[in-house]
Every structure is written in C-alpha cells, then in structure tokens.
Amino acid sequence: MKKITFLFLCASSLFSAFAQVAGDEDKDMYNKGQQRDQQAVTEAVNGWWTQSMKTHEERIAWWRQAKFGMFIHWGIYSLPGGEWKGKKVGGYAEHLMRKEMITRKEYLELAHRFNPVLFNADEWAKAAKDAGMRYMIITAKHHDGFAMYPSAVSDFNIHDQTPFKRDPLAELSAACKKQGIKFGFYYSHAFDWEHPDAPGNDWEYNNPGGDKNLFGGRNWFDQHPELLPKAVKYVNEKAIPQIKELLTKYHPDIIWFDTPHKLPFSENLRVLKAIRETDPNVVVNGRLARNAARNYGDYLNTADRPAEFAPVAAEDEDSWEAIPTTNESYGYSRYDDSHKSVSFFIQLLAKAASRGGNLLMNIGPKGDGAIDIKDLAILKGIGRWTKKNGESIYGAAKSPLPLQNWGVSTMRGHKIYLHIFDFPADRKLYVGGLQSDISKAYILAGNKAVNTTRLGPEDLLVDLSGVSKDTANTVVVLELKDQARTNPVFFVAPNIPLTRLLAFDAQLQGKGFGFGDGKANRYYVEGWKLPEQQLMWKVRTMEAGQYDVVIKYVTGKECDGKYKLMLNNTTSIEGKVQHANSGVITEKIGKLELKQGVNTLTLSPEIISGTELMKLLEVQLVQTNDRRINSK
C-alpha cells in the first residue's frame, strides 16, 4: 500500500449537525516554511532539536502506553456556553470572543462573573480515572488569552479577574497525582485575542491572523514582514514567559499546542527551543512546530473531531493522537446536544489503538465548574467497558492481523485482541489471515474460554455460543504459540451482512490526490481530478457469493463525471456522479459476484466533467440472500 501520512488538517465540517463557522479551524495546521525560517531550522537540526531527540523514546514512553486521555476545554467562555447577549452562537463555544468580536473590556466584565463554585478537582480526576483515562490535558490559556491560573506574567487571569481566587490547575495537578494520572496543559501560543501585539484580534487592534484576512490573511508574515516585530514582542513578553511559568510552577508531563500557522515557523521553533531548555522531559505534541520536512514535536495529531483514521507512515505508527469531542464543540455549549454514543467512543478508542494511536477525548465542563451530565454519562459508559477490556487497549500495539469486516484487532505481547463491533448473528466468528497456531482463546470480559477450529492454513473459526454480546465491542483474546504470522489482505467474513471498504483503506494509484481530514462525512479521498487516479482494494473471501454494491461519496458543484468499478479486471459497474442538497450520496449501483479467494476492486474515472470527480467515502458490499453460490 502506498504510505501516506495523516492529513493533519482542521477544515470545518460542512456536514455535521452542529455546523462550524469560518475561522474555527485551519486547513493545514502547520507551517509551509519560507527562506526566512531557514536559519532557525538549521540551528535546530544541527543543534538543540537533534540533541533533544536523543531522549525522545524515553520521554514519550508513558504516553505510548497510556493510549486514552481526557482533553478539557474550560475557560471564561464556558459561562455563556455558546450564547451572547441572548443570541445563540454556533460552532466552537470557546471561540465566542472572536465570533462576537468581544472587546477585552467586555470580556473582563464576563470574567468578573466567572465563579465556578461547583469545580471539584478530585471529582474531575476521578471521572477521568473511572473512564479508563491515563492522562489529562486542560486549557491553561486558550485563544482568548485568559490564563486559568494565577499568572505573574499577565493580570488577564483567573485569580486577578474573577471572584474565584483559586488555582484550579494546581488543584487538578494534585488530584491527578492522587489518581495516578499524567497531567498537562493546552496553551495557545500563537493566537491571543486580548494582547494588542498578538495575531488574531482584528476587531479591536486590527491585527493580522484574524477573520478579516488583513495584511495577506494566513501568510500575513510573508506579505507584511514589517508587522512581525509586534508578534515577536508578544511571544517574548507573554507566550514564552507563561509557558516557562507553567513548566516551572506545575512540572507538567505534557504540554499541548495549536494553530501554529498564526506565526512564522521560526517563531514556533523558538517557542519549542525555550521549552526544551526549561524542561527537556516534557512531552510536546506536533501542532507546535511541523513543516513538510519533519515534525519537531514528540508526536502527531489528527484533525479535530475525527470519525475515521487515515493510514500513517510507518515511522509514525505509534506516535499519533486523535482528538474527538463528545459533541461538536470543545468548550461547553448549552445548545449543542449532538453528543455521540458511548459505543462510538469505545469503537473509536479501539480503532485508534488498532492503528497504533492514542485517543484524547474532550469534554467541556460548564461555567459553574460542573461536568455536563451528558458528558458524565459518556465517561461512565466508556468506563464500564474499559474496566473489563482495558488490557486490549493500554500498552497495546497495532496488530499484524489484516482488516476484518467485523471489527479491528490490537496486539500485546503474544496476545491478539479481536474487537468485534459487528457481532455475528450465528455466533460464528471467522478470523481471516491468521497463520499462527493458538494455545488459548477466551472472552476478555470474564475470561470465558471459547472453542476454535482451524479452517485451512490461515483462517480460524471462533465459536461464540453462550457468549454475552457487548453491544459496543466484544473482545476475544487469542494467545499465540509462536510469533504472529499473517496474510495482510482484507478479510471478508461470510456471515457479516455489510462490508465497508473505506477510501482511507484503499491503495491510491496515481499522484496528486489524497485523504480528507477524517471527520464525519470527510473520511474521503479528495483531489480526484485525473483519469489515471484510481482506488484499489484487495479483499479475500472464504467462499464465492453475490453482493449488492453501494457507493457513498460527497459531491458538490465542483464534482461531476462518470466512474467505473471493476472487479478482477473482468466485471464492471458504471455509474454517474449524482448530486443532493445534503452533499452526501449513498446509492446502490449494482451487483457483483466475488470469487473464493482474493478479489481486486478498482474504482476509476470514466469521464471527469467537473473540477474533480467526487470525494469518495466508501464502497459497501451488502450480502444478498443468494450470496452462497459456490462453496468450493
């Protein structure tokens, strides 16, 4: 398969029920780099950064083992909760100050009413621990520039400007230590809406980096280098001093950054250098300093609110983190009731672990300090599952077992964990591609032994008779006798009604197109503009059968044309790109008869009459009643 790194993007979702507005997220979330930055890059690569990476493996070891963390967006914006002057404000609630162009003076008036008397650090830490989370990251300062701790650098902070007069970060740090949870901070270093010299506030200070696209928009520092000294002044006077303050005062295990595109790459490197000089052991995420050449942080992040995960390059397989949130806002929003199910997050956690990644799940506590009851319900539901099945997640690695149409798999030592999302109705679990012998098989929750039968040299049948089904994810453990040996081809179990062939799991043939950001209805291939660009899936079946073929894709005014789905270079189905008001098309396009063994499906353009063909999400194979036509 062609190796393609994550598109660590942050383009807003056009299709979520809780639509974002422009400015919430950035498309690239990294610096493209200019000649101006070369001196800083050379200094880093030839000196301090390369030296810091000598302890990278030791520094990040705990994070790789942890797998599951709690992200918390909590600040002054949590009090209005997505409402301003009686008006509902959509999108990310933590962006209230920018969206409503609130002045520093008005924001302080809001701060003067912020008194989270229900805040209880021990309850927050226990909620995280009970959910199975092993680390916590909270917003020490978000884009509004307001410090949620007593900062000596700026009086724009919770102690000086609110009646609360406490240090919630110190209390959380202590509470997490009691629970055995690693602790750290989110810090907005490049975006600061209260500071007169920082990027972002274009309504009060006419600064670059805001929604008005003043001074060249995203790349303002290239088109207007005369403005750069102002931003450097902010970094020198506030950002770096507060980051050092957090490191020396609280000694966090991890520090998390965002929106690096608001500053030139050289400034981001300078911030990272200050961190490494202050605390060489703190873990730093990849959104601080990353360009096309390399990631200068310790690991990479997906886009916001992911629903599916694209493949990553081999060197990054155990160094990435997904950052979903319980609804569609990171800060608390009283109007956002689009909370996902407990099953969604349990399966997302398993999917991340199966690909070698971590899951940092966000909640947005209320302005009074209480955790939303909807978030608590999700945390408790996940906790019930992790308490019984955590062994299959913590310290687990990507499994060598191929993709299966019933779920995913993880591996730890000589054990392979089968995460069954689609529990077979006949209670027969077909496991494809496993050539190794097993010594033992059992259900992880309760250790109930299950019988297995070898079906040829590389397939296994697990008998789930009498097994209590977990509605989210039933985990079966296979203990191997020797080293794992597998066939890497996607396995289509014969008794699972629906097989989803995601665009993310296709082999991309041709250059110039790539993956979307992984959000709901954005886990597509985009940039499909050339006739030589194709998507290919290899799937292996135990028996021949007939399937209805359903295609799901995103379309718009720019998309149009005809396509062809070819099976084994012999049989094909042709289709025409359709359009719908929702932008998402799901349609049955025909039937295909898959042979026993390996089948190759190739989706290619026939005619591209728009600027691109379509944004393919997935091809679905749906079993028909007469699926078993040949069982040789």
Image (spheres, helix red, strand yellow):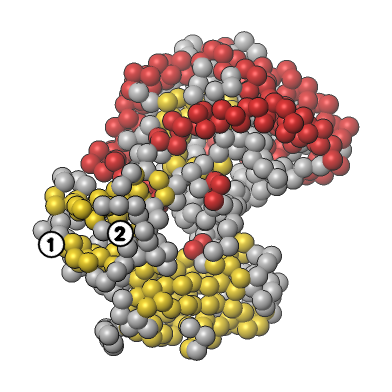
> Which label belongs to residue 555?
none
Q: Nearer the viewer's eye, disc 1 or disc 2?
A: 2
- Mark 1 surroundings: few (<14), some (14-19) or many (≥20) residues within 10 A: few
Taking the image as shown, residue 132 lies to the left or right of residue 356, namely: left
The reply to whether the C-beta atoms of the residues labelled 1 and 2 are less than 8 Å apart is no
Where is residue 478 shown, x and y percent of the image? 25, 53
Mark 1 residue element = loop
Q: In which quarter of the image is the N terminus?
A: bottom right
Mark number, residue 465: 1
Q: Which residue sits at x=21%, y=47%?
A: 444
Quarter of the image for residue 435 reads: bottom left
Residue type pointed to by label 2: Ser
Does residue 611 appear in the picture of this structure?
yes
Residue 472 in view here? no
- The residue most toward the left is 466
* Residue 431 placement (x, y as % from top left): 29, 64
Q: Find residue 436 and name its label.
A: 2
Q: Which amino acid does label 1 sit on?
A: Ser
